[in-house]
Amino acid sequence: MVNQTIFASQATKKQLISNEASGRAFQLNHRQALAQLATTGTLNHTFYQTAQMQLDQVLVLTQDIDAEFIAKTAVYTRQNNHMKDMPVLLLAILSQRDQSLFKAVFPLVIDNGKQLRNFVQIIRSGAIQRKSLGSLPKKMINQWLINANENQLLTANIGNQPSLADVLKMTHPKPKDATQEAFFAYVLGKKYELEQLPAKVQALEKFRQGLSHDVPDLPMQLLTNLQLSAQQWAEIAKNGGWQMLRMNLNTFARHGVFQIEGMDEIIANKLQDQDMIRKSRVLPYQLMTTWSALDDAVPQVVRKTLEQVMQAALQNVPRLAGRVVVAIDVSGSMASPVTGYRKGATSTLRCVDVASLFACALKQVNPDIQIMPFDTQLHSLNIAENESDQASLFGRLKQVFTGGKTSSIFEVAKQFAALGGGGTNCSIPLNRLNRDQTPVDLMIYFSDNESWADQLRTRHKTGMLYEWDILKQRCPEAKLVCVDLQPYTHTQVPERTDVMNIGGFSDHVFTLIDLFSQGKMHADHWINEIEQSKLPT
């Protein structure tokens, strides 16, 4: 008989690798790794990786993954996770792998002018081994341009590298009518007839030339380089879309908009418009970014409205059955921006802020949840021994989650995020639960999974897997969810029927947690969700 020690046991043991922090980890399989990169990667620098490393990983992984899964991942991450650059990169790769699938998913990934320009830039950069667009990509780009409405074309004309003019010069779309022909000439700096331009472009040019004092209903970026009065800024606020309004509250305050009678209520009402919120695809972390950066000049009614909007944005937060524990990684690496380091980035919200926000959202819907912030130690929710219950973080949690909301969910999440800053030991919450013999039905981690301070002598386990297996002996029905907020391709606990690894920082994470906790997911968990996506034919 063969040696059971070296043959039978090896089949059940996954090989350990070193993670970015030089700790032990398990490598995700190719599909899991691509999904993780696509839902968290922004092609910017992270705490441990460069943007080029992310790109290289995607290019290598897609060589060994079928084109259909690449297409489904691109669509899934665009529609469910609201990612931008990664779905476009996958689409560009698909243009070389499978033209039929590329054509089918192009309109699902390229759903606005910025995505279109991103696609052109990725292709012409040579990053996917070609610099020319090719006949089918040109055809799809021109199809988008010809079918785009006036607002879409105007929005596409905002931004450079490449500009819309650059795109037009590369693809040479044939205008469908005289109005579109005049607009293309306008963008290219060629001769055009003002009367033939789209109505909104005519209004813009007349406003710029002083022929009209009525502020045109146009994207804010087309107007802000002009000398505008407070009343004109107020008109921009009235006309603007939801995301523009959210991102420019300080700008409106700076230009005196809130000093105009009634404008605070008008803006607050727009921010509460449920249809606009739904169309905006706002993510919870974006609301926290806005709230954190609000100037003192922004009225209280607008601040309160943002907190109310957060409740709407968290409508996917599930009610979880049983005894639930949420572990928040507050280590130093979690202080990196969740969307990466990039000059001019619109968000500087950190991973730890997002993790804390998600934990607080779960706590608000499930008041009995136990929250365990950790780095290389567990952090108490009572920040100081001499604090009163009301002054402690635990006290503030109770105020928020029992209706006495003297502190907002934003404020509590921000205080969670300030707790740590040290190294990472992902096993320490489980170790404490095991030490105290705490019963657990569902354990949820929000982390970057870069554990290094819990190394074991055993060759086959991470510290976290070791502690999880001990907990499973006490609580055999327990389940573990590891939510990874960063684009790394490994995990502390490998995928099993009782363990789900997912990536992302959109509220779609809550939907997956809910399905998994109820046993409604396939054995392949998150990857099966992507594979079940329907592609247009």
Image: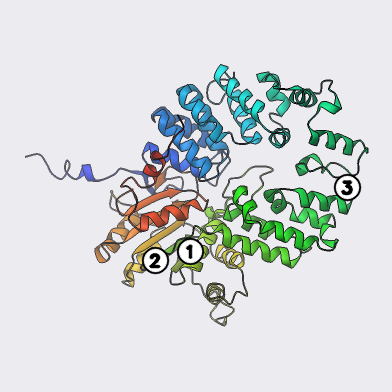
Image x and y of residue 132, in percent: 59, 18
* Residue 3 x, y percent position in the rendering: 11, 41
| Residue 125 appears anywhere in the view | no
SS state under label 1 = helix
Q: How far is the residue under mark 3 from the one under mark 2?
A: 54 Å
Quadrant of the rendered image containing residue 301:
bottom right
Secondary structure under tag 3 reads loop
The residue shown at (25%, 62%) is 476
Quadrant for the N terminus, please: top left
Q: Are marks 3 and 2 in contact (CB under 8 Å)?
A: no
Of the two numbered discs 3 and 2 in the rendering, the one whose residue sits closer to the viewer? 3
Q: Which residue is mark 2?
A: 324
Q: Label 2 is placed on what type of residue? A: Val
Whichever of labels 3 and 2 marks the residue nearer the N terminus, that label is 3
Cβ–Cβ under 8 Å for marks 1 and 3: no
Q: CA distance from mark 2 to mark 1?
A: 10 Å
412 left or right, relative to 23: right
Q: Nearer the viewer, residue 207 or 485?
A: 207
- Res 322 seen here: yes
Number of residues whose C-alpha sits closer than 10 Å to that of mark 3, classed few (under 14), some (14–19) or many (20 or more): some
Return the x and y of residue 220 as percentages of the image width and height. Answer: 77, 44
- Asked if residue 416 is positioned above or below residue 507 in the image, the reply reads below
Q: Which residue is mark 1?
A: 362
Q: Earlier in the sequence, mark 2 or mark 1?
A: 2
The first of marks 1 and 3 along the sequence is 3
Against 76, is 368 above or below? below
Residue at the extreme right of the image, as rendered: 210
Disc 2 + disc 1, Cβ < 8 Å: yes
Q: Which mark is residue 228?
A: 3
Name the side, left or right, on which 536 lies relative to 209: left
In the visual, does 454 lie left or right of 257?
left
